[in-house]
């Protein structure tokens, strides 16, 4: 293993090279002259070469000393830059916020929250990685994000989950669909419908599948999509029945282009929240993000 150079010795070396005087170097470093002299002898022994020629009271760099100075200046500049960057992190607003969230959450949940974050932390750097619950969990595992806005996962004890709101999944149909006209869902008709469902590898698909398995039903999925917006458009065209959360369809419910109906007597609820590594202390901006999410999503709770 190559021995490292002591940074205090490197700083003293650079100062001695600048002043060409042990007395002046010691004065600027607030050290004794003997301390600087001892430090340089130790550095030369460590490197196995002479760095200075002593000419009376002056010191001149040798060729080896000139080579070291070239690298020392770069190292000390990088160290100064690193310290400045760390000091900036300690100042109000000089922070980053890395979030994992589904595309739907990015469209419907995050905009008002992030607007408040930018207002409170105008110089913060915000990075968002879009991905559903399983992808968001992987983002946290691999340190691509620090927080994930997700559905509550199961059997993930290494993560801490902060609930923010719950929703209920419902049937959504076009206004001309027989269920919409009757304002009710006939249980025996549920397995006979064509369904437009979200991505089969998603957490939501698993929840829906488990729900109807417990109801002793199997849904006929004819279209599977990775976009909630696309699902809504196909349901509007009467191509099938969608299963969605009302907060995703607020606009369509208001203008009458989609009609919501309950899945059955037993509700299918999902819990949303903020997830991060268990035991990890949240920063000020992350605590603020969590608080704002809770405050803003009160309107979405089912």
Image (cartoon, grey):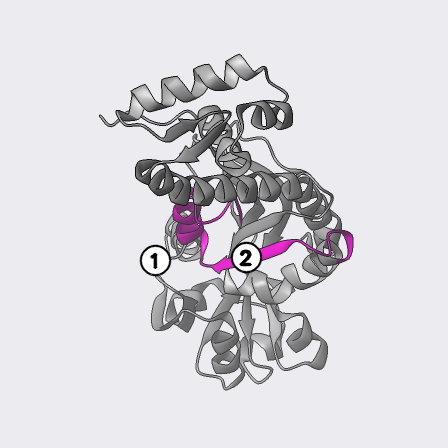
Label 2: few (<14), some or many (≥20) within 10 Å?
few
Res. 142 in view: no
Label 1 close to label 2 by CB (< 8 Å) = no
The residue wearing badge 2 is 127
Label 1: few (<14), some or many (≥20) within 10 Å?
few
Vertically, is 115 above or below 52? below
Q: Magenta span has 130? A: yes
Q: Nearer the viewer, residue 209 or 50?
A: 50
Quarter of the figure with residue 262 = bottom right
Which secondary structure lies at badge 1?
loop
Quarter of the figure with residue 55 = top left
Res. 61 in view: yes
The residue wearing badge 1 is 201
Q: Nearer the viewer, residue 7 or 83?
A: 7
Q: Nearer the viewer, residue 158 or 45?
A: 45
The image shows residue 225 at horizontal and vertical percentages of 39, 71
Q: Magenta span has 103? A: no
Residue in the image at 42% along x and 22% along y: 40
Quadrant assignment for the N terminus = top left
> Which span is picked out in magenta?
119-148
Residue 136, which numbered label? none
Which secondary structure lies at badge 2?
strand
Vertically, is 301 above or below 34? below
Mark 1 / mark 2, whichever is N-terminal = 2
The image shows residue 183 at horizontal and vertical percentages of 63, 72
The image shows residue 102 at horizontal and vertical percentages of 50, 59
Residue in the image at 37% along x and 17% along y: 42
Residue in the image at 54% along x and 83% along y: 236
């Amino acid at each position: 293993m190559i021995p490292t150079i002591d940074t205090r010795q490197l700083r003293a070396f650079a100062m001695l090279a600048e002043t060409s005087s042990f007395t002046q170097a010691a004065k600027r470093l607030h050290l004794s002259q003997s301390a600087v002299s001892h430090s340089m002898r130790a550095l030369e022994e460590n490197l196995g070469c002479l760095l200075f020629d002593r000419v009376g009271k002056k010191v001149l760099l040798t060729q080896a000393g000139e080579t070291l100075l070239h690298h020392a200046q770069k190292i000390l500049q990088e160290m100064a830059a690193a310290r400045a960057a760390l000091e900036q992190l300690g100042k109000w607003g000089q922070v980053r916020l890395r979030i994992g969230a589904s595309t739907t959450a990015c469209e419907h949940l995050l905009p008002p929250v992030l607007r408040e974050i930018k207002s409170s932390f105008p110089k913060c750097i915000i990075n968002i990685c879009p991905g559903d619950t399983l992808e968001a969990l992987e983002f946290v595992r691999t340190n691509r994000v620090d927080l994930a806005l997700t559905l509550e996962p199961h059997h993930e004890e290494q993560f801490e989950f902060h609930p923010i709101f719950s929703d209920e999944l419902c049937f959504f149909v076009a206004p001309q669909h027989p269920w919409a006209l009757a304002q009710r869902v006939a249980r025996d008709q549920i397995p006979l419908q064509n369904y437009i469902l979200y991505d089969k590898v998603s957490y939501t698909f698993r929840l829906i599948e488990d729900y109807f398995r417990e109801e002793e039903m199997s849904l006929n999925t004819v279209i599977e999509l990775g976009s909630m917006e696309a699902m809504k458009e196909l349901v509007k065209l009467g191509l099938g029945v969608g299963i969605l959360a009302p907060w995703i369809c607020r606009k369509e419910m208001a203008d009458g282009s989609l009609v919501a109906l309950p899945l059955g007597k037993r509700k299918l609820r999902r819990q949303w929240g903020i997830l991060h590594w268990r035991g990890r202390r949240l920063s000020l901006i992350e605590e603020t993000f969590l608080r704002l999410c809770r405050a803003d999503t009160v309107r979405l709770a089912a």
